[in-house]
Image: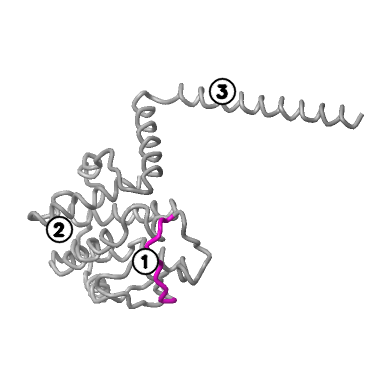
Amino acid sequence: MQNLSKSIEKTRDEDVGALEGQSRWRWLLNRLRCMSPAEVAHRGRVAVAGQLRRRLGGELIVGRKPEAVLAGAQWLRVPAGIDAAAYVDEARLIAAGSVRLFAQRRFEVGPAPDWNRCPRLGVRCPPLPARSIDLTDPDQVGDIKYVWELNRHLHWVVLAQAWALTRDEEHLQALGRQLRSWLDQCPFGQGPNWTSSLEYALRLLNWSLVWQLIGGPESPLFAGPEGQVLRERWLAAIDVHT
């Protein structure tokens, strides 16, 4: 009787598993019917790119260019009559390496910060593949909340605001210096800043504001050969965030 009971339970579990499998396949087929051919193609490219990145150990692979999206209609404009003084004062502190995190205390991170270093505890995460980093280990990452907060780049928005209000090149230069240092220090898939998809999204939100405020693809930040290189590097980083 005991063997019979086990056999019945096993059969029941197999039947439930088969039904769940069929339900999932029905859901997937129905989802595909709701997609346009363009969406199916896009999702396929994203899935293939993700597999390639994993197989190549996180190596950067750029399958598309987001210029068309980023060069589209401007959706953020600076209203007239804003007093720029507060923005300029904050931007100059940021350019000197003093950044306010969580709208609370300031941290001295330098004009070109060490982006993998915890501002609160001073611990620098080693250049490891993101998937191998233990985010709960303070000896490896410090306080990861502070690492992530710095790398959301909310303070870059202040630099862009100060430039948009004054057209003073010092603010744009400070932004370019920090952007270059981030791109140099944080290659795709390496370090603590590639461990959370939520952080990707928050960083992109701030990047999109900065992009708009500095003038998009025709920004003075991208003037000359070096500026064009910076623009392409930034676009490539945007690509792997999406």
Name which residue lies at 30% across and 47% down: 60
Name which residue lies at 28% across and 75% down: 110
SS label for mark 3: helix
Report the side of 176 relative to 204 (left or right): left
14, 27: nearer the viewer: 14
- CA separation, marks 2 and 1? 25 Å
Q: Is residue 125 covered in magenta?
A: yes
147, 57: nearer the viewer: 57
State the image coordinates of residue 171 (x, y, percent, origin top left).
18, 67
Q: Give the residue furthest to the left.
A: 224
Quarter holding the N terminus is top right
Q: Quadrant of residue 64?
A: top left
From the image, state whether disc 3 or disc 1 is nearer to you.
1
State the image coordinates of residue 8 (x, y, percent, origin top left).
82, 26
Quarter holding the C terminus is top left
Q: Is residue 31 above or below residue 238?
A: above
State the image coordinates of residue 134 (x, y, percent, origin top left).
50, 61
Q: Which residue is mark 3?
A: 26
- CA separation, marks 2 and 3? 50 Å
The amino acid on which the numbered mark 2 sits, given as a three-letter code, is Leu
Report the side of 43 relative to 137 (left or right): left
First along the sequence among labels 3 and 1 = 3
- CA separation, marks 3 and 1? 45 Å
State the image coordinates of residue 165 (x, y, percent, origin top left).
18, 64
Q: Is residue 76 above or below residue 14?
A: below
From the image, state whether disc 2 or disc 3 is nearer to you.
3
Q: Which residue is mark 1?
A: 116
Q: Which residue is mark 2?
A: 221
Q: Which mark is residue 201?
A: none
SS label for mark 1: loop
Q: Which residues are magenta?
A: 121-130
